[in-house]
Image (cartoon, rainbow, N blue to C red):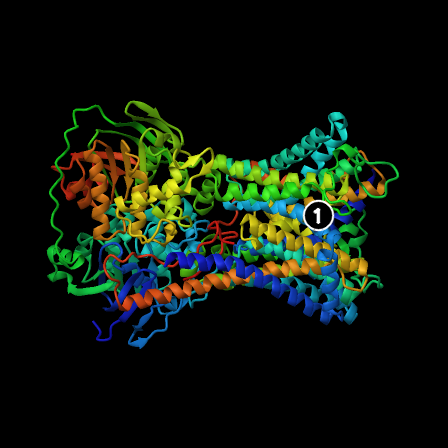
Amino acid sequence: MNWQLRTRAAGLNVVIPLVAVALALVSVALLLVVAGSNPFDAYRDMWNAALGDRFALSTTVTKTMPRLLAALGIALALRAGLWNIGAEGQLYIGALATTAVALHLPDLGTPLLIATSLGAGTLAGAGWALIPGVLRAKRGVSEVITSLMLVYIGIQLTNYVLEGPWSEPGSTFPSSPYVPTGASLPIIVSGTLLNAGALVGLALVVLAWFLMSRSTFGLRLNAIGGNERAAGVAGVRVPLLIVLAMTASGAFAGLAGGLEVLGVRGRLVEGFSPGYGFEAIAIALLGRLNAFGILGAALLFGALDAGSAGLQTAAQGVPASISQVAEGLAVTYVLIGLGLASILQRRRSARAALKEATHQPAAGEPDVLPVMPTESGREL
Amino acid sequence: MSSVPLVRLEGVTKAYPGVVANDDVTLELRAGEIHALLGENGAGKTTLMGTLYGLHRPDAGSIIVDGREAGIHSPRDALALGIGYVQQHFSLIPTLTVAENVVLALRGSDSKLSVRGGNARVRELAATYELDVDPTARVEDLSVGQQQRAELLKALARETRILLLDEPSAVLTPQESEGLGVVLRRLAENGVGIFLVSHKFSEVLGISDRISVLRRGRLVGTLDAASASRATLAEMMVGELRAVEARPVPAAHHDASPRLEVSDLWVAAERGGFAVKGVGFTVNPGEVLGVAGVEGNGQVELTEALAGVRRPAGGTIRVDGQPLGGRSPRRTRRLGITHIPADRHQSGLVASMSVEDNLVLPVADQSPYSVGRVLRRGAIRKLARRLISEFDIRVPGSGVLAGALSGGNQQKLILARELSRRPSVIIACYPTRGLDFGATEAVQQAILDHRDEGAAIVYVSVDLDELLSLSDRIIVLHHGALQGEVSAAVATPEQLGLLMGGAAAA
Amino acid sequence: MNSHFFAQLLVATVALAAPLLLAALGELISETAGVINIELEGMMLCGAFAAVWAARGSGSVAVGFLAAAGGGVFLAAIHGALCLVFRANQVVSGIVLNIFALGLTSFLLATALGPTTSPVATLNAVHVPVLADIPGIGKAFFDQNVVVYAAYLLIPCIWFLLNRSPIGLALKAAGERPAAAESLGVRVTLTRALALGACGVLAGAGGGLLALAAIGFFTENMTAGRGFIALAAVIFGRWRTFGTAAAVVLFALADAFQIRLQALGIVHIAPQFLVMLPYLVTLVALAGLMRRMRPPSALGVNYVSS
């Protein structure tokens, strides 16, 4: 009986996000009709810009990467019940550190320079997330607000460096000098935007999957996320693991920032992230905290972004912001779907219990109650 | 007494997943009577009171107040009918003062007060009923006994006609309980009908007018207190009289050096002060040391300090001569201490993880369950299968979520995890709480088996009969201090009761 | 720097603080009842958009403000539906609604409002005779628009509401011990919904004030993080009314200082550090003073009555 329930719940983890995305696209279409645009034209243009050809696909993948990496990190921390809502700041700090190393150690030689720069970005992101991690583990301060505060501190710090020490007279928009060509990630399919960062991204999906589902680390994170106190009683070193989970989470986001600099822009530009770190939270949820689910959700967001950027160039009066509307609606519908599923589940088990009241189960029958499992036990 | 009962519960049925908490219960409460609801833990007493108070709706049956069908859908409806409920976990807001809590409780009623008016009204009520509480004190700064008085004041301020009290003496010393009895009697004389929920017949016999006994959700019967005896009540509660267990023969390890030595142990309380004050004892291999005390007198803090979950503020703990200290459940486990925590939901298991993941959690980094940092599912499943059959956990498969198990099976799951490591010291805190007879016996037997193999056992319970039948020696905690130590072979419940109330050992 | 500089700084601080104050007081009410609104930023943004849109349509500033409140309530209602009905996590809902609000207002700006139109009518300053002419402080305190005065007058009102009225006790109970509150007869979900609604009204009005105080335009993402500053102010103010108000004024002062310095071309203090000040001091406060910082126990925790 129970494996059926598990399957049904696992099915819900796929069905709810898919239905939600479909509903979101329909809703946006309706919005476009109200605004006097033809939604079919808009969606066709978006499709072409996001998935139409190899170049479009490479745009989508490029736009997917930072969201994907940040979301994997967020999911990892969420397994332990930790809300790293500061990925946006970790992304900026990671990009800043990567740029700094790439600019100041140009003599390292290509592979070493790239590795060192990205390593610096990863460490910087991890360090930025270490602060809320330690505060949570040692002082019990909720990581939600501290990591959020660190977003804006990180962005302002980046702005300061770009407008102060690194500012170049005459440049119209605050940005760093370009990194040396030796530090740029190679394009792996010529004629497209697809750079080596995509391979790193794929590898990290597998790494995240392994960490979350197949490692002792992941098992302990799940235990902390499910019941911090019981995990401690069972011998899990909770404070240490909280710090580790947060830093690992920040490392993913920091690397995302580094890859964005070396792979996409070639330099650090003020405000380069339009909120990747925040969207990543939505992506982690849409992907139901599963590494491959997150890959799918990140690709969707990347495609919406690439597609809506195409809309602007097609200049047919549909603003690019519809991608954000679609993203917001998709996750809103997911939240409604999950809420409905759990309410229905509760009703069903209550009914089952009442039925049981009228006839007692046979002796020896295992008394197991239907409970809807989520991937990690987190309430999302 | 008037012919129309104050409250009539008719055919009330309430089912929860896996358990029928109330099954067709029909009961009456008259004005001016104290009506005890007696039953073991899990008999459905609290559920019945919750239904009457509108905390949940019955699946079937009706509630009749003053002869009229009362649609009680929420506590608001209950309050409007003059029903007051002093729950086991108080419904006070800790950050507000006593008076503010009373004002909040009166919000929307006819006798509502301003925030400032609350102090005077509370002082007046406290004087009338001789309930000593400072209206301006924050609830979180009060002792448990004072908090209970604040709860009563709240009910009094609302001019409650129907008062529900859930295990009011669980948090009180015997002397405080007596004081409470006086107040309740006075209320009853003024015409208030009182439902008094308890699982102890001694307190019920002394104070109530009538006694209703619940067993496994069903009403067994209602008696006049005057005509009830302990024996009949016990039989009604339990079904058949439990065969008195032969007192276990103390195992023959007593001349060995102690396994567990605790001296001058101090543990800080959550909110200032100390929960455990200079407690010291030893436990030999093959010995059960019972820990008695009114709930909340430092038992949980003591066991958590022994298990390394809580950092002691002072003193020493030695296991086989090895000192232990600080806060590290991990190190404690390595020294062979195992811990069956007081609250299995909060501290025992991770409900959202599977049975097998719960079982492997403390040993996940050991061979054969993982290599490097990679989990080996095959080995883990094998471990789970072995423990499930060894401890008779009723579960269809090891991939089922732990939260889906019944209470008894959850406790067996914890025991399986904790005892499978052949511990040398077992710290068990309320290990049989809320379990049915079968599960209780299985849990006790598993622990006794380990005693026979030479483990030293610290066994905490509020149930004196359980302690007397399992322990070799019993220590009594009162306000965190060691009140006395007695040999279980010669101790009586009365003697322990006095010690629990703070009387010095004879 | 002379007295003129300080007078201008004061004027700017009082004006900059007002929209933050509205949003922060709203958030304080909501958090007291146990609901956290990461989407406070989105509420302000919706309020600002609705204000300009309605003021354009009606030609009336008052209608603009009503719509602003409505814009905030719109987002609060979605948050309430997600968290109070469908029991979604409040942080997730808040983050997602920020994305949604930014997308929606930008979309509507491009489609319904049109980006390049003339400004709508704005609020006039109410010049209090005599007092406004007090040198140094007169202009700051007695020559502002009516909504600014209202924002400051709200401080004692909300203090009274939270600390001296039975409603305040109910809000605290819902945010501190929802289960206990329910058994006291407090309808926790309703109480939280109303607190959330109040937050929507105030944050929306705060957004409206941003748009209608002087400029009369709506621009994409025009709140630029003010919602998060208001959120920080509630925390830095330790969930107390006057504390929150003081935090808002401090943050506004830092902002005004930064703007004045930039305007004067003074560069020896990097403005970015003044911009990050609210976040930095809040972080430090959380890190260092946690023992004295006690958020409502059930903040962000959904309550499910059985």
Q: Horizontal and vertical percent for residue C44?
A: 68, 57
Q: Chain of mark 1?
A: A
Please determine whether, in this image, residue C300 is positioned above or below residue B247. below
Q: Is residue C61 visible?
A: no
Instruction: Left or right? Give the position of A236 relative to C114.
Output: left
Where is residue A332, by image quadrant? Answer: bottom right
* Secondary structure beneath label 1: helix
Where is residue C204, by image quadrant? Answer: bottom right
Q: In what quadrant of the picture does the C terminus of chain B appear?
A: top left
Instruction: Left or right? Give the position of A66 relative to A226.
Output: right
Q: Horizontal and vertical percent for residue B45?
A: 27, 60
Please determine whether, in this image, residue C2 is positioned above or below residue C203. above
Front-most of residues B381 and A223: B381
Q: Is residue A211 visible?
A: yes
**Residue that lies at the very extreme toward the front in this rendered image:** A190
Front-most of residues B506 and A63: A63
Q: Which residue is mark 1?
A: A62
Q: Horizontal and vertical percent for residue B138?
A: 43, 48
